[in-house]
Amino acid sequence: MLHRIRLNSSSIKWIIGGAVVAMQFAIAGEITLAQDSPIIVKNPSKVPIYNIEKLREMGRSNSSTIKAAQLGIDGVAEKQDAIHKMRFLGIISKDLPVRKQQAQTGMTAATANYTQSELDLNFSIAYTYVSIIYANQQLDVAERGINDLNTLGDIAKEIVKTGSRNDVSKKQIDQINVYLNLFNGKKEEAVQGVPRAKAALREALGVSDINWDLQTADKVLALSNIEVNRASVIAEAQSRRGEIVQAQSAVDATCLEVKAQEKIRAFAGKTFASGSDIHANILPIASLDENYRPGAIAPEMPGNLYGSKKSRVNQAKILHERAQTVADKAKSLVVLEAENTYLRWIENKNRAISYLKSAEEAEKLASSLKERFDPRGGKITLDEVITTGIQANTIRIAANEAIYKATLALIALERVSGGGFIAPPITKK
């Protein structure tokens, strides 16, 4: 049976521009869910620790997607075996030798589907694992901002009470409260973020226990300095992506269908759907709004062709040409995805470099002013201390986000290249 070809995992959104972070899990600490409110884990030391390699091994053993892909291979193998045992049927069915060849294209497609499913699984696990690390980092920044503001709020209240400085009034207290609400909002994003990331990770791993939890072995995302070659990534994607292999299998099968129809003398001739299974997956839906994303072309192969031999052969040739067009479109979309992922890596790597430098300078300035501030008087004002502290924490949040997006792009490069590009270590202890 001919299914539709997909350009991407159904569980992971097809990536154009910055859409890879459309499912960001925000910023979060380690929590579990109870009704509508999170509960902080009381004994984190009892929660098992996993690294990404261990999780991927676990996923390969439990994932329904991997199991389904393997069963697809088993089913095609069984069908192949059945066709090859039909020795005497060849006397009646002159197209049987061609059907045997078409059955092999089904195995090629099924194997490609399995390989791509593994890459998609690895991506899903890495995506959610990295999101948990990122979330906890952002939670640290949010809590640091809250603690700093609470300290400054107490200082401001004491100054207003004693009147030790004329440049501090209720205005500064109100200003601090505004920023406190801002950082409390960021913390709430964090508190709700990690359980979403963990839930997605559980699903990818094939874990049904909603109480299953983990601690990540890695704690801090690191910005990799690896050099990525754009042309190499695109070339690997063109030669290795499972979707392209599946599309080419359909081209090969339809080419053989022309030969098969030449051997059939009846008015109606069954197509290769009876002898092979060209595995393919769901097509990405085109998006023609501001989040532009082109869609693929759906393949086509009826179960039967009707008419004279000449007519059926011509119909098969048309279907073959159409299959080639589908494969060409699939290839162009794979190239587009690979190129966009590469460009996202470059963009976010450069952003992260700038933000990291800015964050370090801002934190040094904020720390210096806070240490030198004198509640009794002096040149350094409380407004300066408040402003530089907010800037330092805000820029650190932006730097963490840029590193996170750059990391996701590296992970995605491994998937979009069909495993040709190997993502480097992306965290540090």
Image: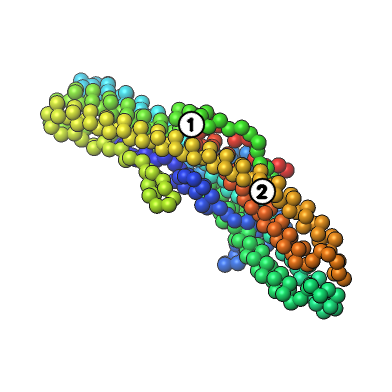
Q: Is residue 424 visible to us here?
A: yes
Instruction: Choose between 178 and 57: the one closer to the eye.
Output: 178
Left or right position of 146 against 128? right
Q: Is residue 158 visible to us here?
A: no
Quadrant housing the C terminus? top right
Q: Secondary structure at mark 1?
A: helix
Tell me what residue is drawn at x 49 percent, y 48 percent.
Answer: 19
Residue 69, placed above or below residue 154: above
Residue 156, placed above or below residue 211: below
Residue at the disc numbered 2: 355
Tell me what residue is drawn at x 57 percent, y 67 percent.
Answer: 36
Residue at the disc numbered 1: 234
Please provide percent x and percent y for residue 176: 71, 69
Please provide percent x and percent y for residue 128: 58, 48
Say which of marks 1 and 2 sits in front.
2
What amino acid is at disc 1? Ile
**Spatial distance from mark 1 to mark 2, Cα to Cα?**
29 Å
Tell me what residue is drawn at x 66 percent, y 45 percent.
Answer: 354
Q: Secondary structure at mark 2?
A: helix
Residue 282, placed above or below residue 33: above
Left or right position of 371 against 51? right
Q: Quadrant of residue 161?
A: bottom right
Give the residue at the far right of this rendering: 376
* Mark 1 vs 2: CB contact within 8 A: no
